[in-house]
Structures are given as structure tokens and as C-alpha cells.
Image (cartoon, rainbow, N blue to C red):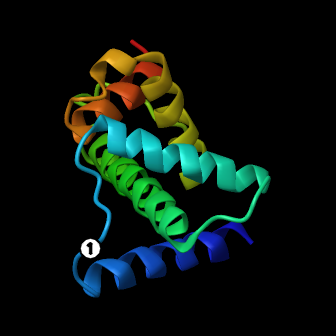
Amino acid sequence: MRALLFCLLLFLSTAVQAAGPPYWVVADGQSLKDGLDIFDEMGTRTRQLTTEEFVRSAIAANYVAAFVSACYIWQTELPNQAPFELPPHLNAEESAKVVLRYLKSHPDLLHEEPRLLVFDAIVAAYPRKK
């Protein structure tokens, strides 16, 4: 079921971006946090999301999932150079939660580039064991 939901989110985010402006992008830590907040709320099913909220959450979650996928490649190909040690089966939902926790605990950094914040969140959550 989660895989189906993730595929649907990926499809919708791609379709919205292909339709052209206006669409939502992850531009900084604040926009990433906003999207991940919605993604987290979507998991609780407390209310019906608007189409825009659904798309924003999909784009934010996919941003994190793609970054984590790249980190897995880095860890596999260059294990001694990766500054983190990801668990064997880190899914998209857990990745989003890890990054959201980091963003919530570092509100002073939300103006930073999202790629830097996701990287810092991964390193903080999964430091390499020496």
C-alpha cells in the first residue's frame, strides 16, 4: 500500500511540474519543512488534503527519497568516504521523518539550501561508526 501511495505521489508531482507554472518547488529549508509537515500530516489522516497540499507533500517527500537513494549509492560505492551509515532498509516515510525532525529542531537553518539540510540530517541521524 505504501509503495502504491509513493508511486502516486511521484506521478502527481511529475505531472504538476510538467504542466508548467505555477507549481511548487523545494527552494530552501522552509519550503522543504512545509512540504514534509504536510506529508507527516497526511500519514495521520486527520483531514482531507487539498490537491496543492498533496502535491507539495509529494515533491518534498520525493526530494528526500531521491537524496537518500544517492546516499545509498555513495555508501555502497565508497563506504570509507561516506560520513554516514544508513540502515539496510530505510524507506521513504522514515527518511522524511528523520529530515523533518532535524528541520524542526534547527529552525534557525531553514533559510539554508535544502540539499545541505538533508545531508546534515542524514549525518546526524546515522553517523558512521568508527
Residue 127 appears anywhere in the view: no
> Where does the N terminus fall, quadrant-wise?
bottom right
From the top left corner, tell me how far across and down residue 44 is, in percent: 77, 50
Are there few (<14), some (14-19), or many (20+) residues within 10 Å of tag 1? few
Helix, strand or loop at disc 1?
A: loop
> Where does the C terminus fall, quadrant-wise?
top left
Is 21 in front, or is 98? 21
Q: Is residue 69 left or right of residue 2?
A: left
Place residue 54 in its image quadrant: bottom right
Q: Is residue 2 above or below residue 37?
A: below
Q: Is residue 13 above or below residue 126?
A: below
Q: Three-letter amino acid code at disc 1? A: Pro
Which residue, given by chain and number where applicable, does mark 1 sit on? 22
Q: Is residue 108 left or right of residue 112?
A: right
Q: Residue at x 21, y 30 (%)?
A: 112
Q: Is residue 56 left or right of residue 81?
A: right
Q: Residue at x 48, y 17 (%)?
A: 105
Is 8 in front, or is 42? 42
Q: Is residue 5 left or right of residue 110?
A: right
